[in-house]
Amino acid sequence: MSLLCPAPIDRAVRLTDGLRRQSPRRPGSGGHQEWQHFCVHSPGLDVVVNFSLVQDRRPSATPGAERYRVTVLVRTDEWQGAVEEFGPAQVRARQGQVALDYGPNQLRFEDGAYRLRVRLRDHPVALDLCLVPQLHPTLCTGVPVGASAPLDWLVLPRLLATGQVTVGGQRFELGDAVAYHDHNWGHFSWGAGFSWEWGYGIGQDAEDPWSVVFVRLLDQGGARVFTQGLFIWRGPQPFRVLRDRELSVAHDGLIRAQRPFRIPRVSGLLVPSDSCAVPARVQVEGRGEGDRISFSFETRDLAQVVIPKDEDPTGLAVINEAYGDLKVQGDLRGERISLSGPAFYEVVHA
Amino acid sequence: MPERELPELIADSLKTLAREHPPLYGRLVQSLAGLQVHLTLDNSELGIRGGEGAVTVGPTRDPQVHVRTSGPAILGLLDGRVSLTEALECGLLDLRGDLEPVLAVHQGLLLYLHGAVRCPSFPDLFLRLRMVLSGSPSPTARCAP
């Protein structure tokens, strides 16, 4: 179910995007998992920042303990990034608010904008960004994920980012760079036998009002689709959603990345070097009620975030962050949609 | 120099694995049962012994597997700049022994690494390892990590 908060954008974000923290477990579900995710695109620079808070399910964990991680990927002419973990003494995470402090890293929502500050401990990456939402957040509740309890998802796919990013001594000044945000929470285990794909497209300037998000949840082998949807916004308002049978999805080719950039770095010793079931091209065709739309993504580069599975002591879930070019074209409700630009397309086999 | 610190660090890491992830430590013990491994890291030497219910660090007698590597090679592996296969192919990592014990040691290494990415205390151990290895001389391998 998708819900749109009718309040002004600033108030809508404050009402809907606050941290959920742990809630009573639903029967048969895994541990609480929650993360705030941002992607930013500027000429010569692409950034992913993820603040996560998950229930600690390791054998040595005390009941109720949580793990706090900041995951950062920065792509210039090469990748940089890390997964950095913080202990409870270094963390402030307030339920109901967008206010996270993980060591020197911060996420806030203040005065109508997300404020993102990142200082990686062991890698030369620093980031100070102010991200202003350009549309209302959309809340999708009860997203089915196989045998796990359903996930909840908030998406805000169009923001304008201003600030500085420093990577290895190279400084980038961003002015109204396009950005994407989502927030996910629920009870599930990495290794619970599901996979997902999502990608997005954002109009590159104010004259280009379209924003698009595609998401698809499947079983682990990709044989059974639990749900899929293509969400389209025009300016600040939702415009059209195509779902399930209105969409056909085709993958073409596979990326053969020789030792893709992986974080944490040591996980490269545990994942086979050519292990990346990432399509070279994704083609999504939507048809319904006289509308037609085509969403195509072509992978140019790849980074991987490796996460140990909860229940399997030697299992690993790989989050593939494919970077590439997205093109969307179509005719919806009598309007022509056409956008193209850089994007991340995430492919996860959990 | 890592002559003294390295055996101590590896012993600490094995204790950490036993304490923080008993299932993986149990599988490591099983994998290395009855095996002795002689490790040469630059100018340092140490032994790893798989015994009854424990994996320990100490002198070896007639080790079935010999491993020779360098500090920079280990850092290259940990930082993802070189894979295990490349390290073996380039001579950054030299592994000698009969097939069966070598495979058991490889399996043991993977179990140890799965523990390393799961145990809360391993990031600090990696930091200690980095400091210990920073004094290592350059490798004499055919390709640098």
Image: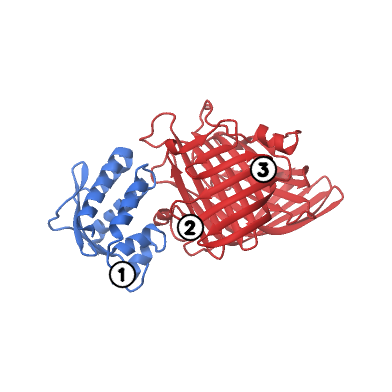
Chain colours: A red, B blue
CA separation in Å, label 1 and label 3: 53 Å
State the quadrant of the C terminus of chain B.
bottom left
Q: Determine if residue A2 is in view.
A: no
Residue kind at label 3, given as amino acid type: Ala
**The label number, if any, that marks residue A140 in the structure image:** none
CA separation in Å, label 2 and label 3: 26 Å
Q: Residue under label 3, please give it.
A: A113
CA separation in Å, label 1 and label 2: 30 Å
SS at circle 2: loop
Q: Position of residue A28 (x, y in %)?
A: 51, 29
Q: Residue under label 1, please give it.
A: B91
Q: Position of residue B88 (x, y in %)?
A: 33, 66
Q: Quadrant of residue B119?
A: top left
Q: Residue under label 2, please give it.
A: A124
Vertical side of A217 occupied by A32: above or below: above
Crowd rating for badge 2 (residues with CA inside 10 Å; few <14, some 14–19, many 20+): some
Vertical side of A183 occupied by A206: above or below: below
Vertical side of B74 occupied by A240: above or below: above
Q: Determine if residue A279 is in view.
A: yes
The chain carrying label 1 is B
On screen, residue B25 versus residue A90, left or right, reads left
On screen, residue B20 versus residue A54, left or right, reads left
SS at circle 3: strand
Crowd rating for badge 1 (residues with CA inside 10 Å; few <14, some 14–19, many 20+): some
Residue at the far bottom: name it.
B142
Residue kind at label 2, given as amino acid type: Pro
Closer to viewer: mark 1 or mark 3: 3
